[in-house]
Every structure is written in C-alpha cells, then in structure tokens.
Image: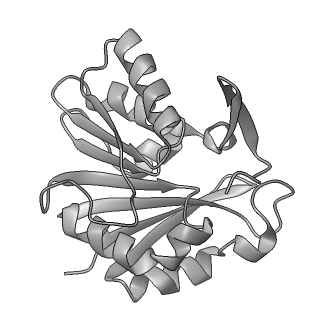
C-alpha cells in the first residue's frame, strides 16, 4: 500500500505518498466547481493537502470532510487544520470501503485522489462508488485523480487504471463522464451521478 513512487512526505517516522504536488489545485478545484459554502468530501485524504485547499475555498460557511484509514494521517491533518484555524475541516479515521458516515445527498463535490489503485479499495470499488453516489447531491461532482499508464512514478503499472477503463467502471456504478484534465504524470477525471 505504501510502495508508491510519487512525492513522499515524512510524518513522524513514517513516509506517506501524495499526488498533490503533481497537479494544479486551481484547475482541479475549478473543474469540481467548488465554491464558498459547499460541502466537500476528500475520501482517502492521506496527508490532507487537497482537503486543506478545499477548506480555504469553501470558507467558514462550508464543510470539508476528510476521511482516511490511517490514524496518523488524520492526527497530522487535524493538527495542521487547527493551527490554520480551519474549523470547517473535519478529519476522521474512516475506512472508505464501508458505509460513509454522511447523510444522503449532503456533499457538493467529492474527490478520490490516487486511491483507486490501492488493492483493498479496488476490491471494494462498487461499495465505495455506491456510497459516494449516495452522499453526492444530484448535481454534485466526483473527481478521480490517478496516475497515467506511462508515468515514470506512482504505483506499479498493474495497479493503474486508464481514464478509459475508469470511465467504464464508473458508468457501471451510476456515474456519467464529464471531462478529463491531463497533468502529465497524473490525470483528473470528472463524473456526475446519473439520474
């Protein structure tokens, strides 16, 4: 799970991969149509860099839910958000392959930032996507960031999912494809719940 080769960051005595530095946050959050007062979900937030950026965008009238399975990531993110006075960021240790602790149609935009290649997540992809579809508003957006097939960094190629294959998987789980943004080594694919 931690054999990634993108940007690694130290948290205490642990290393954790992050794709945040490999994309343009302004393009990503603009594509998600995130704005002040929105509710954002960062599912599999890791270090929480996407969540921190989203918290600045949604402001004090919005909410950012940041979920990750690793308690040390959530502890670090909680400390960082508290130091920045971002009370709208709610970081929780949550296994995203199970029921998400959020009400139906409560989320404006969601992000799966380089998590679908993780074997345990991939095995539960139908459950995860059904839960994201449940919590998203009907006009909400889902962004998925993954490594391009030929990228020299990232997870093993056998774990990667091309944008075309990803679109096909999400179509079978009730989403329709909106657009793709290519950042070189990684891509952002945008989806909306199908009505």
Q: Is residue 99 above or below residue 161?
A: above
Quadrant for the N terminus in the image: bottom right
Quadrant for the C terminus in the image: bottom left
Q: Give the image location of residue 108, x and y in percent.
A: 23, 52
Taking 76 as reference, is 3 left or right? right
Colour scheme used in the picture? Answer: one colour
Name of the residue lying farthest toward the right? 152
Residue 152 appears in the rendering: yes
Q: Give the image location of residue 90, x and y in percent.
A: 28, 33
Residue pictured at 81% horizontal, 60% vertical: 151
Taking 7 as reference, is 178 left or right? left
Residue pictured at 38% horizontal, 35% vertical: 54
Q: Is residue 164 above or below residue 106?
A: below
Nearer the observer, 60 or 114 = 114
Residue pictured at 53% horizontal, 38% vertical: 25
Nearer the observer, 35 or 104 = 104
Nearer the observer, 189 or 27 = 189
Residue 48 appears in the rendering: no
**Residue 102 placement: quadrant:** bottom left
Nearer the observer, 13 or 103 = 13
Taking 22 as reference, is 28 left or right? left
Residue pictured at 44% horizontal, 34% vertical: 74
């Amino acid at each position: 799970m931690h054999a990634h080769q993108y940007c690694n960051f130290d948290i205490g005595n642990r290393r954790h991969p992050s794709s945040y530095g490999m994309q343009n946050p302004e393009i990503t959050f603009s594509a998600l149509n995130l704005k002040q007062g929105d509710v954002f979900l960062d599912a599999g937030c890791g270090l929480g860099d996407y969540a921190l950026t989203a918290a600045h965008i949604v402001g004090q009238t919005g909410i950012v839910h940041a979920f990750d399975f690793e308690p040390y990531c959530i502890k670090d993110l909680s400390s960082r958000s508290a130091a920045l006075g971002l009370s709208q960021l709610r970081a929780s240790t949550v296994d995203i392959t199970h029921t998400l602790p959020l009400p139906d149609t409560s989320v404006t935009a969601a992000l799966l930032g380089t998590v679908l290649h993780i074997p345990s997540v991939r095995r539960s992809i139908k459950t995860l996507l059904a839960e994201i579809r449940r919590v998203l508003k009907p006009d909400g957006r889902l962004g998925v960031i993954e490594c391009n097939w030929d990228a020299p960094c990232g997870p093993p190629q056998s774990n990667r999912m091309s944008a075309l294959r990803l679109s096909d998987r999400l179509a079978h789980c009730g989403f329709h494809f909106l657009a793709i943004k290519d950042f070189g080594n990684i891509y952002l694919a945008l989806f909306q719940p199908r009505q």
